Image (cartoon, helix red, strand yellow):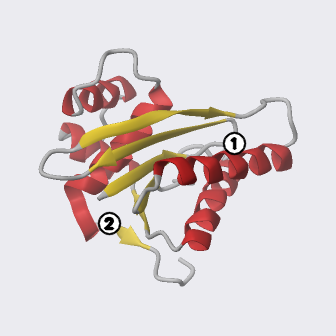
Amino acid sequence: MRILGLDPGSRVTGYGLVKAETKPQALAWGVISLPTRAPLAERLARLYQELCSLLEKLRPEVIALEEVIPERYPRAILSLGQAQGVVLLLAGQRGLPFFLYHPGEIKKALTGNGRAAKTQITYMVSQLLALEPGLPPDAADALAVALTHFYRGQKAIRDSGTDR
């Protein structure tokens, strides 16, 4: 199975594709940088276009995302939610199943500590996937989400078609 982990943002979106077999293998990763001075609508349109191209190129079978947690960064929640909405729109258009993971669950799955620091996540992603140092943090976050899906399987929160 090809799992695309995404860490959507209104300025930078990380992505990471993991091939899930007996042992996970990273196939692709990187970041989509959006023009910081452009209006939000333009950035979201560009994100949509970039993700369309990425989905065509990578051909994932499932998408895994980190849940947006409103209590962490209240000012950023709206734009993060809108970026996540772009991802969910694409998943719906393409009939791709998607799964949401709480940030604490991702940290715990990779480090055993639900409050692990970002540097610990990046380190564990590099170790688990045998990647060279210097992985961009947003790509590491996306790969972490894909790895969590690999380790947790279908136990994640899945969209049921109803509002939460």
Q: Residue furthest front?
A: 57
Q: Identify the residue shown where x is 32% and y is 66%.
A: 156
Position of residue 77 measured from the top left corner of the image (x, y, whole percent): 64, 50
Instruction: Find numbered disc 2 in the image and state the secondary structure of the residue it sits on.
Output: loop
Label 2, on which residue? 156
In the rendered structure, which disc, 2 or 1, sits on the residue that comes first in sequence? 1
Q: Three-letter amino acid code at disc 1?
A: Ser
Which amino acid, mark 2?
A: Ala
Question: Secondary structure under badge 1?
Answer: loop
Residue under label 1, please give it. 10
The image quadrant that residue 100 belongs to is: bottom left
Q: Position of residue 97 (x, y in %)?
A: 44, 70
Using a 10 Å C-alpha cutoff, classify the residue at mark 1 as few (fewer than 14 neighbours), some (14 to 19) or many (20 or more).
many
Which residue does the image show at 23% across and 47% down from the upper left?
Answer: 109
What's the mark number on residue 109?
none
Instruction: Write the residue at 35% across / 49% down.
Output: 146
Q: Residue 72 or 100: which is nearer the viewer?
A: 100
Q: Is residue 158 left or right of residue 21?
A: right
Left/right placement of residue 87 relative to residue 111 reads: right
Residue 102, quarter of the rendered image: bottom left
